[in-house]
Image: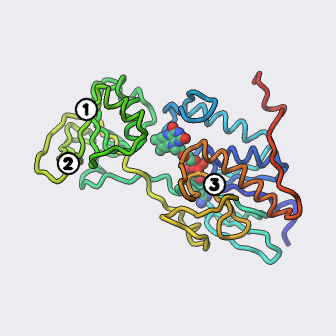
Amino acid sequence: MIQQADVYDITIIGGGPVGLFTAFYSGMREMKTKIIEFLPYLGGKVPYFYPEKIIRDIGGIPMISGEKLTEDLIKQAMTFDPTIVLNEQVTNMERLEDGTFLLTSNNGAQHYTKTIVLATGFGSLKSVKLDIDNAVDFEERSLHYSIKKLESYRDKNVLISGGGNSAVDWANELEPIANNVTLIYRKPAFTGIESNVSKMMNSSVEVLNPYELVELKGTNGQISSALVKQVAMNATKEIAVDNVIVNHGFEINLGSIAEWGMDMENGTILVDQTMSTSLPGIFAIGDVANYPNKLALIAGGFNEGPIAVNSAKQFILPHEPLKHLFSTHYEPLTLEN
Ligand SMILES: Cc1cc2nc3c(=O)[nH]c(=O)nc-3n(C[C@H](O)[C@H](O)[C@H](O)COP(=O)(O)OP(=O)(O)OC[C@H]3O[C@@H](n4cnc5c(N)ncnc54)[C@H](O)[C@@H]3O)c2cc1C
């Protein structure tokens, strides 16, 4: 028999920035909260892909590094002592007769909960790989899909492939550090945010578009040059480079969560304005949640989390009125520390 003490009000699957803030808000609403995270650490994409990048689009925080934001989010999330489970990937969900959910992880661990909040991001944290035969020979040495330390590119010749926010951002961040930065993109127009594209266009970054990467040359894992080709033309160029950074997006792969029976679109989970999925008692927030005009931004997830928590509380206590609550003062979080 399940002991009531083992049943959580909310289990948040995914300890990225959105899951972390949601745990804080859930604690504020006195919900017994658990976070289950697949990685051995919290923070999601931020420490995984860009610990040193400066984040500039969170209201009231003009600039903050990925590392510092993660540190602050963890501190805030711990205010109400949620249970944190690391190194576990949630795979199965079963609804028991009394309505409690039973979650099972890849290591067989079982978790009982009244509601589930999915904050899984794109699931796998895998980047789309470069589609070139010998690319794997250079991976982790001179071909990278994320940037952990900007300093390691000092005085290097860097080629970035991609035209979205990440590629353009990295071009701007590396421009003052690297010897030179070339950015190639296979389409005529960039999809990155306009002011960052303008900054890049007015900098020393050499921009080649529409161009694509067709060959990497080098030995012992070290790239020496890259062959790039003008799209739909025969013109090619060989560029001397030390490092290639590829930002071609992410693989969306929720694993068996995608088979739980929720309505989905392009690998992400459809939610309504209460953050409810099509399965009652299961909510989705952050990058995994999809609705019209969705923005996959940290700040957007910071609003979706509290909405999901309030909806989850209403699911558990359907006769309680919906409350709009905000924080005031908590001992572990004072301005001095
Ligand atoms: C290079 C780069 C730069 C960016 N810059 C910015 C920026 O400047 N500003 C901004 O707002 N956004 C930025 N973003 C986007 C931002 O990082 C995401 O919107 C944000 O991380 C989404 O948070 P999340 O918590 O929804 O998901 P994630 O950060 O993806 O975290 C999800 C977590 O869930 C875990 N997980 C997944 N499946 C399971 C499972 N089955 N069981 C247990 N755990 C699971 C994963 O391991 C992961 O830790 C950037 C992204 C990249 C890649």
Which residue is labeled 2 in the image? 215
The extreme left residue here reads 234
Q: Position of residue 23 (x, y in %)?
A: 73, 47
Q: Mark 1: which secondary structure? A: strand
Q: CA distance from mark 1 to mark 2?
A: 19 Å
Q: CA distance from mark 3 to mark 2?
A: 39 Å
Specify few, some or many for label 2: CA neighbours under 10 Å numbering under 14, 14-19, or 20 or more: some
Query: Along the horizontal axis of the image, is 207 left or right of 121?
Result: left
Which amino acid is tagged 3? Answer: Ile
Residue 187 shows in this picture: yes
Which residue is labeled 1 in the image? 206
Q: Relative to residue 197, is residue 229 depicted above or below?
A: below
The verdict on label 3 being within 8 Å of ligand 1 is yes
Q: Position of residue 232 (x, y in %)?
A: 17, 54
Q: Quadrant of the N terminus?
A: bottom right
Which residue is labeled 3 in the image? 285
Q: Earlier in the sequence, mark 3 or mark 2?
A: 2
Give the image quarter of residue 198.
Answer: top left
Q: Mark 2: which secondary structure? A: strand
Q: Position of residue 178 (x, y in %)?
A: 32, 26
Q: Along the line of sight, which residue is nearer the eye, 108 or 176?
A: 176
Specify few, some or many for label 3: CA neighbours under 10 Å numbering under 14, 14-19, or 20 or more: many
Q: Along the line of sight, which residue is nearer the eye, 233 or 24?
A: 233
Q: CA distance from mark 1 to mark 3?
A: 38 Å
